[in-house]
Structure formats: structure tokens, C-alpha cells
Image (spheres, rainbow, N blue to C red):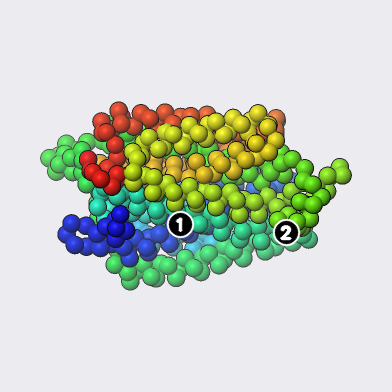
Amino acid sequence: MNFSKMFKTDDGNNYFFTFFLVTTLFLLWGTCNGMIDVMDKHFQDFLHLSKAQSAWVQFAHYLGYLLMALPASWLARKLGYKGGIISGLLLVSLGGFWFIPATHISQFWAFLLGVCFIAMGLTVLETVANPYTTVLGPKKFAATRINLAQSFNGIGWIFGPIIGGAFFYSSEGAEVAQGQLYIPYMIVAIIVLVLAVIFYFANVPDLNTEDEYHLSDSEQSGTKTSIWKHSHFNGAVLAQFLYVAAQAGIFSFFINYIIEELPALSAGLANSWLFADRTALREGAYFVNEKGATFLLGTIGFPLFLLGRATGAAILRKLSAHKVLGSYAAVNVVLCLLVVFKLGWISVGAVFLSFFFMSIMFPTIFALGIYGLGVQAKRASGFIVMAIIGGAIMPKLMGYLGDVYNMSFSFIMPSFCFAAVAVYGFSWSKLSKSEGLVGLETTKGH
């Protein structure tokens, strides 16, 4: 397939540059989210919190999504895509700069407030950028574009733990690390301000998805049709809630899982370049420490996530999106159960593989949910982004299970979430009354 065809519309417009500019936003929020996921263990060490208590970091993060999702949708409708993007960037910058006084305050609530502010800005960006990628070219490549853009999000997930691990953990102890926690967020705040200026001067046209269900016609006739009457949209909101719950739980407690459940390393492996200075000696055996777990997250976990996004974009050009979503979710149910059964290195491998198979879920659920909603796609986008609140609620349950039982058993929570996502994927055609999402097939349209 000619790559340029993904961005060139029938009227001759080519939106490749605009698409490229928007993908920087995916990179940005991937990096911010990746840093959040290595923050839990730092606060467990510094403030002596339990796993369930440290999950307040995720609660604050996803609370920002809940609070801002509908206002973000309103901003997108009133200010257009360009105004919405700039508003989101300014909010992220505000949150990043707040970490400077928060570090001096050095109280848990202050950091949670900064996390919430940044999440509110990211909410605006996600509400705007996700649907926007679907209209920057022919509709038959809509979900391919959103998955391609989400690949840059995957790159950010790799950078996040590496950056976070460098500042959130120190060989000199948690006290030293606490004093430098503001540095990466201050850098993010400055970069974001530069991006806001670039977007202000850039060409960012306001476009809409095609109105498959004739919602704009009903608005013009004075009989406004509710988007909640469309079952594929309702299902997407629930599926996104549960998917993000599973993703947030696995990402947040990955470090705890590696430290507590990874089998002991041989002396030779512990002293190799891979684990040098990344192990701790306990009861005469070598185990991976916090730095080692963060390193594995950034060098194996999130690269598999990125690989899944990149290959997923190619697969979704050939196969129906809902079938791919259902199949990937079903595989992750099996992988999570392998972790629950504590099968040693097999379980460890299953944890890493879960990163690959969850990779395409968020953008694919998003594309399936806004399918055919036309001018209502911006409003629908707000509700689907609001569903991210699942990442605030369910990880606390997973943390509780880890405290009471063990981290292996806690994976029972994401297994149930993935099972529900699989049901949505395999049921989407019936819910939408469509044979398959146009945009994932390169040979024909709907």
C-alpha cells in the first residue's frame, strides 16, 4: 500500500504534516503516563505505604480524566481541534511546573495534585487527538491512522520509565530521590509550552468523521438523537473502562511483581551487564531490585507494547478490527491466568507478553466506539475518555489483592477485565449492525 494514500483525501488535500504534528501529542502523554507507572514504588519506599495506598497515584491520575473528560469534549466542540489542543497543552504545563513547589512541600497530597493537573491536560489532548487522527485522510484508513499514532504513544511509554527511574530512585535512598522528583516534570512543562506555540501557528483544520447514522440530519430537524442509543458506543465506554483498569493495574504493579515474584537469578546473570547494579542479595540469593524492575519495564515491557502497536496497525489494515480486538483480549485472559497459577519463568514471560497483546486495545476500542457518529464523535470521544476512570478504581482492588494474597494472584483482576473486552470485540458487529469497521481494510469500504 502507498503510505501517502492514508492521508490524502478525494478533494486532493494531504494531511500528513498535520498528522505528524498530532503524533507528538501521543508521544507526550505516553511519556507522562510511563513516568506515573514507576512512581508507586517510590512512594511505597519514601512514605512507607502499602500497595493499595500507593495506588492513590493512579487514582489521582485517572480522577483528572474523569473531571476533565466532558469539559474537554465541550472545549473541542467550541474551540475546534486546534483550540482544544492548545488548551490541553497549557494545562499539562501548569501541572508540570506545580511539581517544583510540590517537591518543597514534600507531602503526598501535593504530588497527587500535580498528577491530577497533568492528567486533566492529557484528557483534553486525548479527547481531541484520538478522533482527529481518524479524519486526517480517507475513512477506510481511519483506525489504521489512530493505531499508527498510538505507536508513538508506545515510544513514550518506553521513555517514561527510563526517565522516571533515573530520578525517582537513587542508590543513596528514597530521601535523595524525593528531592529531584520535580526535574523531569519541569522539563516536560517547558517542552509543552514550546509545542503550544507551534500548534498556534500551525495549520490544524477542523474536520469531522462521516455521519453514518445521520445524526446531523436529526439535529437540523430539531429531533436530536442521543448517542447513547447506539449500542456499539455504549459497549465501547464499558470496554474502555475495563481495559484501562487492566492496563493501569499491570503497569502500576509491574515493579512490585518483578521484585516479589521473579525467581532468583544465578550469580553469573546477576553480575552480567543486564543486571549489574540492578539486583539485591536476599537470603543468599540474587533478586531484581527497583532499578532492575524499572529497567525491564522500559527495555522489554514497553518495547513489546510498542511492537504490538506497530504490528497491530499493519494487521488492522487486513483484518476486521472487532475480531482482532476480541482475539487479543482472549489471549490476555489466558496470559493473566498463567500468572495467577505461579508457574515461575512461564508466568514472568506471560506478564511481558500481556504488554504486546493489550497494545492495540485502547485505540481500537476508541475507533469502534465513535464509528459512524459524525459531528457527535467529539462528544462521544469525551465519554470514552471519561471511561479511563477505570484506571483509578480497579488498581486499588489489584493492590489490595497483592497485599492480602500475593502479586501473582492479583492478576485475576485484569483477567476478568480482558474477558469483558473480548466479549465486546466479538459482539461489535451485532451491536453496530455493521459487518466490520471501515478503515481497517485496504481493499474495500463500508
Please tell me which residue lies in front, 66 or 434: 434
Query: Which image quarter: residue 7?
Result: bottom left
Real-space CA distance between mark 1 and mark 2, rounded to the nearest whole angstrom = 28 Å
Residue occupying image coordinates x 83% and y 44%:
285
Sequence-wise first label, 1 or 2? 1
Q: Is residue 81 left or right of residue 420?
A: left
- Establish if 145 lies above or below 204: above
Q: Quadrant of the N terminus?
A: bottom left
Residue 109 seen in the current view: no
Residue occupying image coordinates x 50% and y 41%:
357
Q: Quadrant of the C terminus?
A: top left
Tag 2 secondary structure: loop
How packed mark 2 is, by other alpha carbons closer than 10 Å (few <14, some 14-19, many 20 or more), is few
Query: Which image quarter: residue 220?
Result: top left
How packed mark 1 is, by other alpha carbons closer than 10 Å (few <14, some 14-19, many 20 or more), is many
**Residue under circle 1?**
152
Please tell me which residue lies in front, 51 or 78: 51
**Residue under circle 2?**
273
Q: Is residue 272 left or right of residue 121?
A: right
- Percent position (x, y) of residue 255? 66, 46
